[in-house]
Image: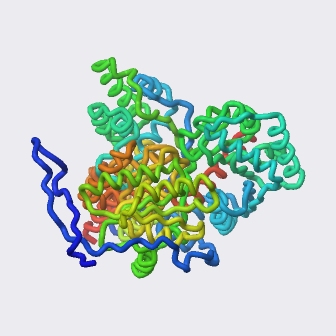
């Protein structure tokens, strides 16, 4: 009987990841929807019936549009509740919804509906109170594009990370969970699976996107990867 | 005059507390110069236009990544072409935008042709009336007006060729050219630059059957759109960061222009740049300045135009001068339309910018101020709330008193003012620059192409 050779699990080298990281980017075109809400009751109804890409637009995508703000911009529903309806309690509850806790739009929609519904059950008279201005439901038409940046090493990864647009960072770091259906992001996935760096991957996943600008997130990711011993 | 002779009172606390009087202190101010009432010779003739910029010139502003994204987007459109059609080659925001957009799209190897419709005075009288009616003015739509509109559209349709794969018709004047559309060959898009939120019903119902034949419509704000059976997209108007009005200036350039106009840069400057038009509420701005001036030292610059070729503008200008009285700190500048560089310098010299409009399209003067990192106070009307996220990228106001309070607040809280200025500039960089506009056109073209392929399959 010939000896069967069992190959040892391949040891990953952080210096030379197994596969390169291809930086892509997503670009969005804003489409004006058919629904609008002038009261909380109308908001609740529209939240339940609007297309998935409207929920995406007013949560994930608006975060990208306002990536430079770190003083409390979370999503359009929260912003409207505060500035058009002067309801800070509901605004705070909606703003506390972290898009990164969701791997599907249906889960995110259900959470928003639950918050507004709960608020209106507590304050039924506020349901018909007119807002200062309506909430216009929009949606995103999306195109995913390649970039010229491909990284096959950690220094190359950091260099590309610093060169790509913030839309690319948003695509890989924030939108990725809708694609992966995992509580993770493309950078962490690659660093863990291709470069054998689960701790770095975990640290990156824990970066707070709501108290940082997207450029700040980029810098933090770069620093974490640069700290990996060569 | 000895500068020590003059004093103003400045509140050093937000206001009376527990019935106490506000604490005030006397401060010395430099000598105030009376503003010149005639324009310097340098602005009396239009300068030669500078050559249009190239895509690479924008890299230093938005970075390489976003410019690369434009090239990637355009790659699949190579060889396909676009036609833009509007009603004027010079003057007005649409022509200004097309002047920059068309060469940039062509540089991306998406050949873009710009055609202008022609018509007699009777046509442009009708379309001007349509324009006002679509903005909500009262108008009696007659059969004769409809016939004039259709006749000139028909004449232009016979004269023009539409061989491009994407045809973009700007505004209502050429809307009936849609009759030339060959569905099998091209996509047609209607780009509406005006506010249709409250149109005259008869004019809109006359135009609607044409609009519904397009493949898509584009509006400048969600609130401007109508219920239509075609997809509607949101394209914000934009500014060109390399234009004379928005390019970076050296401090020496800013100082020279301020000196020419008698603006004292050693003291706070509050500026509104706008035509002398009641809808821009210049009288409200003077009133707000006077209310604020009780507590904070500042100058008010009202820089605009329109008074020389618009009788109504001349009346408003006169009223503004009367309201200003003999206050040497109110500087009123009625500038000719080619003074983009001067406007740029005045905006850059300003401590705060105000745009207290009562009604507004998109409000590109707000975009210009935000781009220059200026803390901006603006009326919550038209497209302004798309640009000013209250207390994050600027402040929104609804009244003269609110405007006065925000002038006081921002002049006495410079760190907050600085932060909203920084955010405002980033907001423009992300959403309201010419390069973003180029990207939107490429995206739209790709999305229409994708829909066409899906339909064919």
**Residue B282 horizontal side relative to residue B133, left or right:** left
State how many labels appear: 0
Q: Residue at x 36, y 32 (%)?
A: A85
Left or right for B194, reference B203: left
The way the protein has been coloured in the rendering is: rainbow
State whether residue B312 appears in this view.
yes
- Give the quarter of the image for residue B214: top right
Pick whichever, B325 or B313, lies toward us.
Answer: B325
In the image, residue A131 lies at what x, y percent?
41, 30
- Coordinates of residue B118 in the picture (x, y in percent): 81, 55
Residue at x-position 77% and y-position 59%: B115
Which residue is at the front of the view, B431 or B226? B226
Q: Is residue A151 above or below residue B130?
A: below
- Name the residue at 30% across, 58% down: B417
Q: Where is the C terminus of chain B found, in terms of image quarters?
A: top right
Q: Classify B13 as above or below A182.
A: below
Q: Is residue A6 visible?
A: no
The percent position of residue A138, horizontal first and vertical second, equals 51, 38
Given residues A38 and B230, the one toward you in this image is: A38
For the point 57% across and 47% down, which residue is it? B220
Percent from the top left, x then y, of residue A82?
A: 33, 37
Q: Point out the image quarter for the N terminus of chain B.
A: bottom left
Q: Nearer the viewer, residue B20 or B163?
A: B20
Q: Is residue B60 left or right of B129 when viewed as pictured?
A: left
């Amino acid at each position: 009987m010939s000896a069967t050779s069992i190959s040892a699990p391949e040891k990953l080298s952080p210096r030379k990841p197994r596969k390169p990281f291809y930086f892509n980017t997503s670009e969005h075109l804003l489409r004006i929807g058919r629904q609008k809400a002038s009261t909380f009751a109308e908001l609740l109804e529209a939240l339940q019936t609007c297309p998935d890409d409207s929920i995406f637009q007013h949560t994930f995508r608006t975060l990208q549009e306002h990536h430079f703000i770190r003083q409390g911009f979370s999503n359009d529903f929260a912003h409207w509740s505060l500035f058009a309806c002067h309801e800070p309690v509901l605004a705070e509850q909606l703003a506390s919804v972290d898009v990164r806790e969701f791997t599907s739009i249906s889960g995110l929609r259900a959470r928003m509906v639950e918050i507004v519904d709960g608020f209106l059950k507590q304050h039924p008279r506020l349901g018909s109170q007119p807002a200062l201005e309506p909430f216009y439901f929009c949606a995103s038409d999306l195109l995913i594009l390649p970039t010229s940046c491909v990284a096959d090493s950690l220094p190359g990864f950091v260099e590309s990370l610093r060169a790509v647009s913030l839309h690319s960072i948003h695509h890989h770091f924030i939108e990725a969970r809708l694609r992966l259906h995992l509580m993770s992001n493309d950078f962490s996935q690659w660093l863990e699976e291709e470069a054998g760096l689960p701790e770095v991957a975990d640290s990156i996943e824990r970066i707070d996107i709501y108290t940082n600008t997207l450029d700040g997130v980029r810098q933090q990711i770069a620093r974490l990867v640069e700290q990996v011993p060569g | 005059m000895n500068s020590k002779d003059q004093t103003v009172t400045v509140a050093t606390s937000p206001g009376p507390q527990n019935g106490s009087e506000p604490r005030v202190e006397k401060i010395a101010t430099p000598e105030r110069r009376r503003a010149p009432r005639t324009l310097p010779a340098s602005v009396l003739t239009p300068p030669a236009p500078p050559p249009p910029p190239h895509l690479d010139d924008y890299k230093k502003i938005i970075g390489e990544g976003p410019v690369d994204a434009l090239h990637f987007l355009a790659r699949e459109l190579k060889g396909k072409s676009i036609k833009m059609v509007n009603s004027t080659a010079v003057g007005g925001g649409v022509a200004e935008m097309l002047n920059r957009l068309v060469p940039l799209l062509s540089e991306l190897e998406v050949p873009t042709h710009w055609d202008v419709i022609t018509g007699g005075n009777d046509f442009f009288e009708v379309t001007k009336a349509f324009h006002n009616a679509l903005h909500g003015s009262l108008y009696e739509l007659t059969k004769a007006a409809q016939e004039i509109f259709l006749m000139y559209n028909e004449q232009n349709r016979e004269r023009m060729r539409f061989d491009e794969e994407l045809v973009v018709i700007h505004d209502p004047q050429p809307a009936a050219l849609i009759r030339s559309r060959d569905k099998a060959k091209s996509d047609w898009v209607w780009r509406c630059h005006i506010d249709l939120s409250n149109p005259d019903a008869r004019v809109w119902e006359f135009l609607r059957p044409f609009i519904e034949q397009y493949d898509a419509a584009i509006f400048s704000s969600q609130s401007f759109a109508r219920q239509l059976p075609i997809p509607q997209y949101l394209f914000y108007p934009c500014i060109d960061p390399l234009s004379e009005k928005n390019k970076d200036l050296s401090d020496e350039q800013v100082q020279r222009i301020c000196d020419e106009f008698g603006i004292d840069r050693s003291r706070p400057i509050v500026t509104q740049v706008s035509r002398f038009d009641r809808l821009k509420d210049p009288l409200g701005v003077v009133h707000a300045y006077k209310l604020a001036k009780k507590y904070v030292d500042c100058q008010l610059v009202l820089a605009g135009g329109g008074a020389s070729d618009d009788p109504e503008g001349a009346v408003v200008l006169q009223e503004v001068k009367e309201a200003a009285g003999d206050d040497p700190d109110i500087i009123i500048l009625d500038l000719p339309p080619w003074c983009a560089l001067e406007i740029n310098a005045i905006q850059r010299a300003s401590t705060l910018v105000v745009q207290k409009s009562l009604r507004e399209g998109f409000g590109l003067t707000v975009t210009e101020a935000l781009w220059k990192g200026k803390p901006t106070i603006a009326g919550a009307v038209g497209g302004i709330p798309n640009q000013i996220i209250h207390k994050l990228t600027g402040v929104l106001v609804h009244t003269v008193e609110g405007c006065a309070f925000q002038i006081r607040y921002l002049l006495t809280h410079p760190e907050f003012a600085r932060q909203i200025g920084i955010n405002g500039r980033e907001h423009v960089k992300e959403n309201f620059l010419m390069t973003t506009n180029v990207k939107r056109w490429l995206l739209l073209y790709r999305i229409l192409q994708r829909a066409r392929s899906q339909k064919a399959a």
